[in-house]
Amino acid sequence: MNVRAWPRSLTTRLALLFALLTATLLLVVVLVQGSAVEGHMRELDDHELTGKVTLIKNVLHDAEPSASLSRRLDDAFIGHDMLAVVLRDAEGRVLYALRPEFFGERQLAADSVLDVTTTWEKGGEKSGEKGAERGRDESSKQYLGLETLVEALDSRSRPTRLRALVGLDVSHHLRFLEEVRKRLWIDIFFAAIIAALFAWFAAHRGLAPLRRVTATARGLSAGRLGERLPERDAPNEVRDLVIAFNGMLERLESSFRRLSDFSADIAHELRTPVSNLMTQTEVALSHSRSPDEYRDVLASNLEEYERIARMVSDMLFLAQAENGHLLHSYSSRLEADEVRALIDFYEALAEEKGVQIVLTGEAKLTADRSMMRRALSNLLSNALRHTPSGSIVEISITRQGCLAMLAVKNHGDTIPSDQLTRIFERFHRASPERHRHGEGAGLGLAITRSIVETHGGRIEVRSDAGVTTFTLHLPLV
């Protein structure tokens, strides 16, 4: 069957399949039971014919030769309106006839006497031994007949063999079977319709969660991502879909929320330098100034441009990292000497703040050297920024199995637990005041996480009792 011919509605398909299955099962039952009933009726008819032949034999055997044959047989067949009997002698003369119209010309023909028992039907062909056939005559009557040889005593008390034709009108049985078949066909038709209706109703109820999923998906918008489907009322076959759909909504809601926050953060971060540029430019243009004053304004504007350029560069780097478009090379090796060189770069800033940087351990890992230097630089500058004077920033490199563990630990204020879960988000700062103190745009830790994940590693942070530790887990190969 062509799949395109099926209706697109799953409910209609289930209803049609259930109706087809019901009709098929009922049809099989009807055929089996109809065959059994027909066979049983045929067995009863055969038994009736055999019984009447036995009755004829008993009448002919027990009767006296001088008694009238017709009278004895008429008395024996009183009340048998569906029965026909014809007795003939060896020469074909009819000795007794009861409703001979039941028989056809072939059965009444004066053929030679058969010495076997056969059965036939009017208008049909003779069957094999002990067989039977059915047919219709002009009056739509159907008969079942039996032809056999019986023994009787002639007028001289000598045994003689007679040809006995016994016929039985079975039209009422066949009409009953036909009526039953017609009624069963009608019953099958209505049963299939009822089954289809019940199946459609059950499928319609069962697929209600799918319609709710569709309605929820159709009504989704940026302001309605908080909607969820009830999982408890969903059937087992649809519950996984509902759970997956709710999970998708949660991810979409989280992504839209981050995107919205990201857009707001971008606007907030750009507003300050753009506002500074506009203010300084307006002040400079308010009246004539000396070349040195214009030079100072341009230098200040350049600082703001550099800040904007760094932020745009960092945002581009994050976008490339999230989309897998970063160009990296893992052919270089990151060793402890690289970390020492980075420490030397920040040594002046550390001495200015009165902070000491300590490096312990050593491990070699294959990574993109420039990207890893940037990640470590972000962590080290972040640690120096939040470490009080007189404290130590510890950098440790260890090896654990097939991983290299690089940890940056500093003393300072404990980061609240609610801030730890968001510390790697873009533009996130643990305190709003840090932005006013000249800190970066809040993209350094987000960039660090992207670099680590690009290398197939992960980063985690712990802050407890005034000690904050950032740990990088990186594969050695």
Image: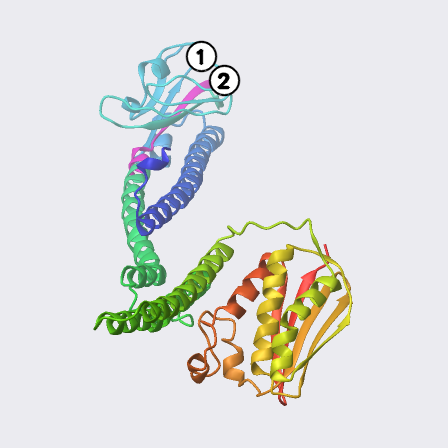
Q: At label 1, which amino acid type do we have?
A: Ala
Where is residue 344, by image quadrant?
bottom right
Quarter containing the N terminus: top left
- Between the C-alphas of marks 1 and 2, the distance is 9 Å
174 shown above or below 239: above
The majority secondary structure of the magenta stretch comes to: strand
Pick the front one: 254 or 175? 254
Point out which mark residue 90 bears: 1
Instruction: Answer whether residue 78 is magenta in the image.
Output: no
Q: Secondary structure at mark 1?
A: loop
- Ranked by sequence position, the earlier of labels 1 and 2 is 1
Q: Secondary structure at mark 2?
A: strand
Left or right, residue 126 beside residue 137: right
Q: Position of residue 286 (x, y in %)?
A: 21, 73
Q: Position of residue 78 (x, y in %)?
A: 32, 37
Where is residue 399, by image quadrant?
bottom right
The range drawn in magenta is 161-175
Identity of the residue furthest to the bottom in this view: 465
In this rendering, the label closer to the viewer, 1 or 2: 1
> Mark 2 = which residue?
160
Residue visible at 42% across and 22% down in the picture: 164
Where is residue 2, by image quadrant?
top left
